[in-house]
Structures are given as C-alpha cells and as structure tokens.
C-alpha cells in the first residue's frame, strides 16, 4: 500500500495494521455469511434477519458501557479483549446448528464490534494529537475499505465453489483475523486510564449530555445511507430498472475504490468544527442529489442509460459519504471530553448500529415500496439532516 493510504509510521500505522487485519476477515465474512447461515446452519431468511437485527439492536446499547470501560481500564487492553471476544463470537457462528446458539452469537458479535469500535476510537484519541485525529481516522477508513475489498474477493472464491468446507474456512479466517488484530492492539503504547467520576457525577455522563445526543441523532439519520449499496440498490436495480445485473457490483466497487483513494484527501481539509459542520451540510446535499439520480434510474431509457445514471448517482453518494465521515469524525472527537472519549465515541458510534438495525426495514419500505417518490423523500431527509448539524453543534 502506498504512503497515501497508510498513516505515518508510529502508533497510528500500527493501529491501521490492526484494523486492516480484521477488515480482511470481515470482508470475506460479509460476502459469505448469509449463504452460510442459510445453507450450512439451515436458517430461513426471516430467522437470519431477526437474529442480526436483534444483535445490532443490543449492540447499539453496548457501545457506551464498553466505551466507559475503555476509559476506566485503558483503551488498549479493552480493545484487545473485545477483539478476542469478536473472534469468539465468530467461532460460535462456526458451531451454531441451533437457532438459540445463532442468536447468542449474533448478540455477542454486535456487542463486541460496537465496543471494539468505541475502544479503538478512544485509543486513537489517546495516541494522536487532536489536530491530526480526523486525518488519521481517514487513513484508517481507507485502510479498512481496502481490507474489506480484498476480503470480499476471498469470500467470492468461497461463493464460487459453494461448499460447506469453503464457508467454514471463511469464518475460520475471520476469527483468526480478529485474534491477530488483538495481538497488534496489545502491542500499541498504553493510554492512561481516566480518573473515576467525582462524587455526585454520573459515571455515564454522555447519557445526560443532551446537546451531544442531538448531534449523534443527526449523524445517525445521515448514516441511513449505509444499507443503500449492500441491500437497497441491488433490489432496486433488479426490480425497478433496466440496468444490467452486474451494475450492483460495479456500484459497490466504485464506492470502495473511491473511499480508498480519496477519503484521506477529503479529510485533510477539515481543521475544526466550523469546517466539519460545512462538510456535513454539503454531505446532506450530495446524498440528496444521489437519491434524485437513483429515482431517475427507473426511467425507461434503456439498459446503458440506466447504468450510467446509477453510476453517476453512486458517485454523488460516495462524495456525500466521504464528506459526512470527515465532518462527523471531527465533531464526534471535538465535542467529547478528553477523559471520556470511550463512552462518548461509543454513543456517537451507536448511529452505525442504529442504521444497521432500522435502515433495512425503513428503506425497503420507503424506496422499494414507494418507488421514485420514496427516493425523493429520502433525499429531502438527508438534506434537512445535513442542514441541522450546524445548529446542533
């Protein structure tokens, strides 16, 4: 990987290596998990959907207490332990042949992932000066996307052969990747634990911080873009457009490569809350424009015209995604107390779990049920949320 992808040598680069390692396993797991659960474990689609929704719903609440634990015990050790717990949850998926075991694994997986994200953010905040956190976070995002892309290609090999052994191998690699990540995290410099809350102060102060809760809510609304490429657009392309079947894969590739190549460049221009707010406002407009393009893709203009509109709209969507990420990282770090980054990052990051929990149901109803008008409503929501971030901050 080039110097533009990885952060400068030091703790930040080692943190990137830890995230790259588990991203490789995660990419393969994400591609193969649905077929593994259905063909090997023997679950129905509603059972899989309910289990994953339950897991991420619980995980949305787990980030704050686990982030608080990272503050109090030190984020390095807690991050390493949660990486091991994630590996354990994948191992539980490997042995799941009963629905109750699958549900337990889904809950453990989502909770460990949510807590791990909060602990890693706290670790980043402790190892990197405030002025460089957003740029380093962008390096990490680019690294993760590159790892996911390579992992997805490995998962594609398992899909090609479609055997139980192949699927089991993919899950084994994912579990191993988190164990290796745990070792890399444990070798990072230690960050001193935060002091205990003073008498009369709440331990989970973020739960009483209403302004921060509002900022986190606005961010969660904007994160509803997350299920678009993986779930909504493939179904939209197949059912509502004349675009070729390969278009969905092309859109995902365009998104992934764009983030890998340009996320760091976009984030480098964020130098404070004022810039971050402006970026989030622009992100809302770009996401809204992308939604407008997706609505147009249903027009009767032929296969290539539909594919072209979808590619252009995905370009707008990924611009919005990168602008939002850069602005949100600065806001999430900048408004959190220095000694409580773990619990605050856990709360701010819960927007990801919320988007994964309610996004698929909400967007399938809105977009696939309403058609082009649903895209326009979603675009208006993105534009309004982007404009609301300024007053919220």
Image (spheres, helix red, strand yellow):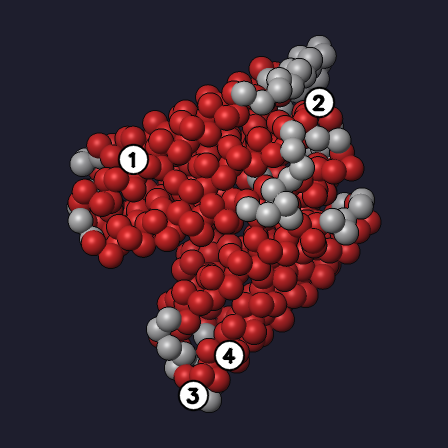
Marks 2/1: CA distance?
37 Å
Disc 2/disc 3 C-alpha distance (Å): 57 Å
Q: CA distance from mark 1 to mark 4?
A: 39 Å
Q: Residues within 10 Å of mark 4 (few under 14, many from 20)?
A: some
Q: Look at the image and tell me whether residue 343 can be seen.
A: no
Return the residue at label 1. Answer: 172
Q: Position of residue 330 (x, y in %)?
A: 72, 43
- Give the number of the disc on residue 93: none
Q: Which residue lies at the image location 74% right of the left edge and 49% below the top edge?
A: 268
Marks 2 & 1, CB-CB < 8 Å contact: no
Residue 280 lies, in percent from the top left, at 70, 55
C-alpha separation, residue under disc 3 versus residue under disc 4: 10 Å
| Proximity of marks 1 and 3: CB atoms separated by less than 8 Å | no
Residue 105, image x and y in percent? 32, 33
Q: Which residue is mark 4?
A: 308
Check the image and report above or below for 194 versus 54: above
Q: Quadrant of residue 201?
A: top right
Q: Left or right: 98 with respect to 116?
A: left
Disc 4 secondary structure class: helix
Q: Are marks 4 and 2 in contact (CB under 8 Å)?
A: no
Sequence order check, earlier mark of 4 and 2? 4
Work out how far the residue at label 1 is from the one at label 3, CA to CA, in angstroms: 44 Å
């Amino acid at each position: 990987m080039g110097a533009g992808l990885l952060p400068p040598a030091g703790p930040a680069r080692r943190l990137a290596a830890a995230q790259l390692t588990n991203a490789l396993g995660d990419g393969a797991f994400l591609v193969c998990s649905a077929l593994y659960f259905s063909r090997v474990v023997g679950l129905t689609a509603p059972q899989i959907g309910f289990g994953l929704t339950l897991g991420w719903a619980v995980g949305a609440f787990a980030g704050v207490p686990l982030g608080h634990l990272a503050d109090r015990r030190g984020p390095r050790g807690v991050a390493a332990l949660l990486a091991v717990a994630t590996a354990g949850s994948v191992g539980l998926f490997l042995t799941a042949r009963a629905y109750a075991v699958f549900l337990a694994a889904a809950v453990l997986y989502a909770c460990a992932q949510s807590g791990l994200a909060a602990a890693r953010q706290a670790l980043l905040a402790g190892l990197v000066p405030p002025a460089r956190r957003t740029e380093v976070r962008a390096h990490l995002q680019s690294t993760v996307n590159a790892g996911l892309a390579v992992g997805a290609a490995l998962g594609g090999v398992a899909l090609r052969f479609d055997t139980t052994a192949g699927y089991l191998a993919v899950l084994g690699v994912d579990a191993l990747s988190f164990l290796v990540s745990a070792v890399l995290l444990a070798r990072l410099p230690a960050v001193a634990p935060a002091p205990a809350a003073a008498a009369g102060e709440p331990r989970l102060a973020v739960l009483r911080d209403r302004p921060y809760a509002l900022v986190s809510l606005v961010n969660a609304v904007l994160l509803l873009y997350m299920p678009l490429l993986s779930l909504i657009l493939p179904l939209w392309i197949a059912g509502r457009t004349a675009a070729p079947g390969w278009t969905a894969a092309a859109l995902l590739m365009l998104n992934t490569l764009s983030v890998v190549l340009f996320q760091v460049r976009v984030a480098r221009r964020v130098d404070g809350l004022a810039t971050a707010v402006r970026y989030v406002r622009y992100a809302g407009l770009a996401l809204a424009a992308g939604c407008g393009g997706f609505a147009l893709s249903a027009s009767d203009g032929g296969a290539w015209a539909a594919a072209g509109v979808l590619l252009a709209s995905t370009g707008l969507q990924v611009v919005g995604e990168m602008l939002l990420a850069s602005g949100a990282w600065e806001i999430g770090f900048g408004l959190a107390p220095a000694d409580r980054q773990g619990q605050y990052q856990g709360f701010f990051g819960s927007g990801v779990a919320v988007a994964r929990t309610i996004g698929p149901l909400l967007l399938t109803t809105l977009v696939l049920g309403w058609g082009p008008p649903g895209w326009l409503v979603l675009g208006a929501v993105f534009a309004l949320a982007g404009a609301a971030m300024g007053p919220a901050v």
